Amino acid sequence: MRLLLRLRRVDLRAMKLQLAKMDWQLRGFRPAYWFSRNGLETTGPWEADVPPLPAIVPGSVQTALRKVGKLPDWNVGQNSFLCQWVEHFQWEFFVDLSAIKVGEEDSVWLHCEGLDYSGWIGIDGKRVSHFRGAFEPHRFNLTKFLHDGKLHRLSILFDLPPEEQGQAGWTTKTKYFKPRFNFSWDWTPRFVPIGIWDSLWLEVGPVQPRVVKAICSLAEDLQTGRVDVEMESDRDVTDVTISVSRAGKIVGRKDATLNYGRQTISLDNLSVEPWFPNGYGKQPLYELTVESAQEVVDRRTIGFKRVEWQANPGAPADAENLLCVINAVPIFLQGVNWTPIRIDYHDIRAAEYRKRIDLYKKMGCTVLRVWGGAYLEREIFYDLCDRAGVLVWQEFPLSSSTGDSATPTDPAAIMDLIGIARQYIRRRGHHPSKLLWCGGNELQTRPDNDGKSRPLQADDPCLAALKKVVEQEDPQTKFLPTSPTGRVFYAHLNDFGSGELSHVHGPWNHRGTWEEAVEYWSKDDSSFRSECGMPSAQSMALMKKYGKGMKLWPPAKDNPYWTHTSLFWLPKEQFAEQLRGLKGEAALKKLVAITEDWQTRILQLAAQSCKARFPRCSGFIVWMGHDCFPCPINTSIIDFAGKPKPVYEAIKKVFRRKPRG
């Protein structure tokens, strides 16, 4: 089915045509074959190795192939190995367009919010532009190619993905900024998706002014709001009207004239209600609307809150202020680390987002930390968090590695990061759920002569550049250099009472006795824990479903089912006595029960300990929230199917209680 565009001069002259509704197709070529097929070399056998097949947009190459039986279910057993050939082909998404005819002053722009990772835009088999970067939006002027009213084929051709690093690597060498978790982590196999992961559309008609970003703030009186709207115009004189409303009632409106380039228009003295986190109050939301020439050019949801960061009582003098005060109310930041819902993150449906965020809201979460090894979460994620009252701690795309965890030093890589960070803020900075921007996960100095390293500070050259971006784009929002940020990365028992502890990570496991766990948490004097976990096995039903055809017992280093994704979390000899004499399914059932109980008791103890010390301790964030792959054993508290493990209810009891401080 072709897209039929007939521009009729009715109420709206500019048209925003969502390309996701079109019938896209996909085909695969050996490297450079697409160009040879459409170039001067016409005698060679340059046809596609993978003939055209249906594709859903947004979506990945892998999902399209799986739906027609060319790939197995990569979640089953070790099938992910059988999917890696996809990385060695170039892939063309294409759709036929017809009857696009524009006036002399009109234009046709292609907007792509997420292309992963690099490639070319083609019209009728000819390259007309190129793109690079999974984390930044792309915009292409296609007017001269699509203005004549004839049939045209639009192609988005993806090159081979770059060889980014997984968990085993060197952060200093990171330079491609494609989601690193896809290159393998301790909770997911290598699976490198290719394709379109966010919305895309054609904008047809007169050139319209564009909203670059919108930043909201709330005065000390908690009743007076302000919105700063940065706009960009390609014309010398453009009249716009900006309004803020709630439930159809206008609370602020302003007419302005834009000149060529960028300028900021502010609406202040708005009478508004404050937005509160989950469990602390209501979440009133407002609508920001921008109109030009009687057309709506931008509409988005906003809200107003006032955030202050105070020092934790008893923390070292040089520690980051991590006592969060929102609308004059001290908040205990409790929640989970948010990792992607699926390894094929291009194809996550809206229902999957709703399901998990609803679970976290009911659990009592006030914050979700979007981990730095992933990506900028989608607009729907932020929208749902706005409504749920769940704050978003958004990290820029940097994470630790086994080789080194220092930041990149290559100037080109830093410049790319600056552009990415700027786009993160411009795309999501208007959301009331936004809490802070963070440089990345577990970024540390290189080990000293004693083999010790410590979290990097904001004077690190790369992090200093990211901090400057935040100061320029969103100065009222906190920039955290990395997580954790204290003098000490991980708190050992002998660190308690030293006066050195503040913001730490871990532990992620406990292999000792219950009494040793009680001793550890009773002596804890850290001021913030943004990663803390305990592994448990997934259910028997999931093991049977996704371990199909594999030997499920025993959980050992020579068992491929367990080592594929769970090598870090093997129970080893910890439960040997309780499992003695058991084999097969009986042993598996016992292991599931033991690890579920152990995870429940340890994490409930840890969460209670931290929350009881509020405000000396001002946060506890579980590592991790949900599985994106059916790991036999992992630290998740919600399994791959979206079902809470028993620990969920235990933590819910802790989180639903108000802190006493």
Image (cartoon, grey):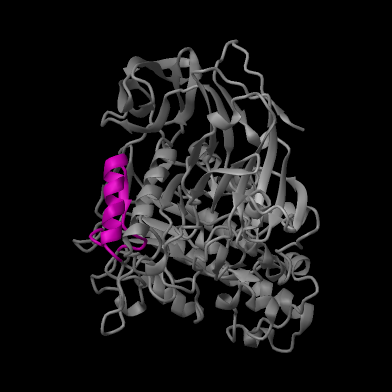
Where is residue 286, by image quadrant?
top left
* Viewer-nearest residue: 619 or 546: 546
Q: Position of residue 317 (x, y in %)?
A: 18, 61
Determine whether, in the image, residue 537 is placed left or right of residue 300: right
In the figure, 472 relative to 531: above or below? Answer: above
* Residue at the far left in the pictured view: 317
61 vs 264, left or right, is right
Which residue is painted at 60% across and 52% down in the image?
A: 158
In the rendered image, residue 378, in percent from the top left (x then y), is placed at: 53, 44
Comparing 233 with 514, the one in front is 233
Residue 393 in the image: above or below residue 107: below
What is the x, y in percent for residue 217? 32, 32
The residue lying toward the viewer, choosing from 119 and 61, is 119
Q: Tell me the quarter of the image containing the N terminus.
A: top right
User: Looking at the image, which residue sits at the far top?
Assistant: 10
What residue lies at 30% left-to-right and 27% top-to-bottom?
263
Q: Is residue 235 magenta?
A: no
Residue 529 located left or right of residue 453:
right
Magenta highlight range:
456-485
Percent of width and height locating residue 465: 28, 53
Whether residue 17 appears in this view of the structure is yes
In the foreground, 82 or 444: 82
Q: Residue at 58% x, 56% y: name it.
A: 159
Q: Is residue 284 visible?
A: no
Can residue 476 be found in the magenta stretch?
yes
